[in-house]
Image (spheres, rainbow, N blue to C red):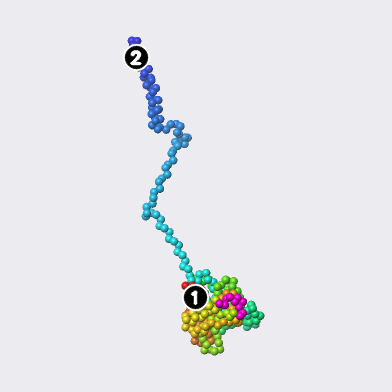
Amino acid sequence: MRILAGLLAAVMLLCSGCARSVPETASMEASSSGAISSGSFSESGPALAPEPEPESIPKLESETEPPKPEPEQEPVLPLDGRIICVDPGHCITPLVSKGYKQPLSPLSDEQKSMYGRGTQGAHLSEVELNLIVGLKLRDALEALGAEVVMTREVSELTISLIERCEIADKAGADVKVSIHADGNNDHSLHGVSVLVPAAELLGTPEIREESVRLGELMVDAVAEETGAHNRGTKARKDLTGFNFSTVPTVLIEMGFMTNPEEETLLATEEYQDKIVTGMVNSLLEWYGAD
């Protein structure tokens, strides 16, 4: 009996040791298997690892944006950057024939009439014709890129020859083109001519050479375009509009309004357009433009 009781006591002692080892073993297994301990929790829940950044997926060739087209450049016009003063001669003013005088030249004390009526045809007055052709010339030159400064754009205006020169000078014009028509008691006279400055009374003598060169180009080009009689160039020292000019200047006499046949032509748009074409061609050649 003492032997049996001893064996029983030994078995009970062995069993109690096994019971104690089971929770410890389970706890160790849980820890080794990666179970989250109470220290891994915050008040708001478990701390999560940051998500990995997504790998960039290359676009297919069909999905790529097409290249943007290059902006189209404006074509360079032959008279870009050029400044031309167009001066339709004469004007309608109540001061005409009132005795107003102006200096002939900055180098002279001589005085001459400040305002003139111009000549007259059966269809138009010279004041009207000069303006019509002047506005046509303006439009043609602007279409080629030029900046055009007009001394007048209406008929009824009081403006002196010295003021016309000042307009061209203040604008920084390269050249001043005065537009006129001829008249004479001899009604048989006809043809186109271009007046250019003479040297004697020019306030700015350095303008003469280029004025003469343009004058020769212009009379030839207009005569060729219109078929008019070419009367050539004439140097004049008695024109205030030349002597006070600070830029090269010419004065075209488009034809004789006192010649019935030529005046009829001058009144037509077709003939006016030919005159303008000739003037434009001469200016292009004068500038050396294509």
Q: Quadrant of the N terminus?
A: top left
- Foreground: disc 2 or disc 1: 1
Q: Residues within 10 Å of mark 1 (few under 14, many from 20)?
A: some
Can residue 206 be found in the magenta stretch?
A: yes
Q: Is residue 72 visible?
A: yes
The picture quadrant where one finds residue 2 is: top left
- The secondary element bearing badge 2 is classed as helix
| Left or right relative to 182: residue 108 | right
Q: Circle 2 is placed at which residue position? A: 7
Q: Residues within 10 Å of mark 2 (few under 14, many from 20)?
A: few
Q: Circle 1 is placed at which residue position? A: 285
Find out whether the residues at labels 2 and 1 contact each other: C-beta distance under 8 Å: no
- The secondary element bearing badge 1 is classed as helix
Where residue 241 sits in the image (x, y, percent)?
Answer: 59, 78
User: Image point 42% across, 42% down: which residue?
Assistant: 52
| Left or right relative to 101: residue 1 | left
Name which residue type carries label 2: Leu
Choose between 255 and 211: the one closer to the eye. 211
Can residue 260 be found in the magenta stretch?
A: no
Where residue 209 sits in the image (x, y, percent)?
Answer: 55, 77
Q: Is residue 50 above or below residue 149?
A: above
Report the span colored magenta: 200-209
User: Image point 36% across, 15% down: which residue?
Assistant: 10
Choose between 273 and 207: the one closer to the eye. 207
> In this figure, what is the number of numbered marks?
2
Choose between 152 and 104: the one closer to the eye. 104
Name which residue type carries label 1: Glu
Measure the alpha-carbon separation of dots 2 and 1: 137 Å
Where residue 172 sits in the image (x, y, percent)?
Answer: 57, 71
User: Image point 59% across, 73% down: which residue?
Assistant: 169
